[in-house]
Structures are given as C-alpha cells and as structure tokens.
Amino acid sequence: MFKNVIQTREALQDLMGKPSSLAVNKVIDCLDEHCKTFIAKSPFLVLATSNKAGNADASPRGDQPGFVSVLDQKHLLIPERRGNKRLDSLYNLLENPQVGILFLIPGSRETLRINGKASIVTDQELLYPLKASNSIPLVGIGVKVEECFLHCGKAIIRSNLWEPSSWLALDDMPKAGEILAAHAKAAEKTKEEIEVSLEESYIKRLY
C-alpha cells in the first residue's frame, strides 16, 4: 500500500526540518502551577497506553473540571469511572507502565501533554476525594510525571473543533447503534434496541 516510507530519524529531519529552541526547551519534568491550573480546568483527557508487544490504544476519560487529582509536582491520579469492563488501558498498564496523556479544555486552542509511568492504584484515602454521585472509584490510574509541555493550537484551529457553526447536525452524526450492530454482529438486537440500551446506560450507569 505504502511505497515510500521514511525509516531513519535523519531522513525525517531532512524532510521536515528541526524544531525551534522554544519547542525543544518547553518540556519540563514536573507539574508547575501553570500545569496544575490547566489540569484543574480540564474536563477531558485522552490516555494513550500500549502492551508489552507495543500494540497501542488511546482511551477517553472525562468528568467535571478538576476530576483528575494533582497529588504533588510529580504525581497525579485519574479516577477509573464505571465503564464496560473491557479495561483495555488497565490491562496494558499491567504489561507496560508508560503512558501519554492529552488534556483538553473546551474553547482552548492549546492542549497539555504529559508523559510518564502509571500504575493501578487502590489507595482509598486517595480515591475517596475523587468520588462522584456518591460513587467512589474502585481504582485509579496513578501517574508519575516524566515530561510535561503545552502543545500549540494549530490542530484545534484547523479542525474548528470548538466552533459550533462547523459541527454536524444531529441527524448527520454517525449512529452509534448502527455502528455497534454492524461491528458486534449483534443479530439478537436491532440497532434501535442498541441505541435505547446505550441511552439507558448513560442515564442509569454513568457512575
């Protein structure tokens, strides 16, 4: 499928160029006050993990702003909210602790990137403050920060991500029930029944 593939760092730099001193020097190894403020105002993140074979996965996490606890300058804790029990990210962490995290704030063009090592935490004294709707998470993802830096807003600007005028009408959105029915080959349920089940889970089993 792909005929021309770059295979060395040198070839990539020759084609793309080298980063500016600002892009290189902006990386810090701890959570300063700016990072803490960004995390406190972020209601959404994407967590990237991989298993020991290098098979990668990216998973969304979201809740009210401040749902991620900053424990100190080197550690943060992400609550593991109720889900479908696939536990893809957690299984990956058991094999490979390295993670990449992208924090977003609606309306902000810039994002915050954090890389580090993660573990599955059950410390109740740390998880209790992260309760929501009287539900205390059974586990959390504890992260030791190794790299932290602000990512520029070009991707957000190009995508018009926060511009309501660019959003699809609801009728034009991909239909979750239709997709799940096709992918899971759920012959026992129609796409309409799956849609109803999804909506019920969003209302009754969010936490």
Image (cartoon, helix red, strand yellow):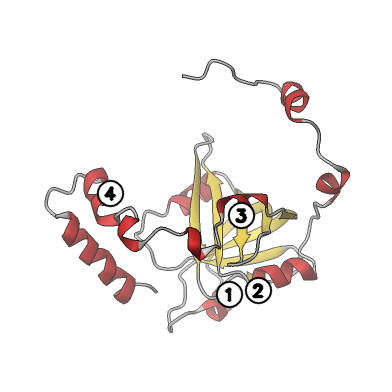
Tag in front: 4 or 2? 4
What kind of residue is marked 4? Ile
The residue located at (82%, 52%) in the rendering is 26
Sequence-earlier tag: 4 or 2: 2
Crowding near the residue tagged with mark 3, few <14, some 14–19, many ≥20 C-alpha atoms within 10 Å: some
List x then y, in percent, for residue 152. 71, 53
Tell which residue pokes out farthest to the left in this image. 188
Q: Which mark is residue 179?
A: 4
Q: Say left or right for 37 vs 177.
A: right
Out of 66 and 90, give the one closest to the viewer. 66
Q: Which mark is residue 156?
A: 3
Residue annotated with mark 1: 65
Out of 46 and 141, give the one closest to the viewer. 46
Tag in front: 4 or 3? 3
What kind of residue is marked 1? Pro
Residue annotated with mark 2: 40
Tell which residue pokes out farthest to the top in this image. 3
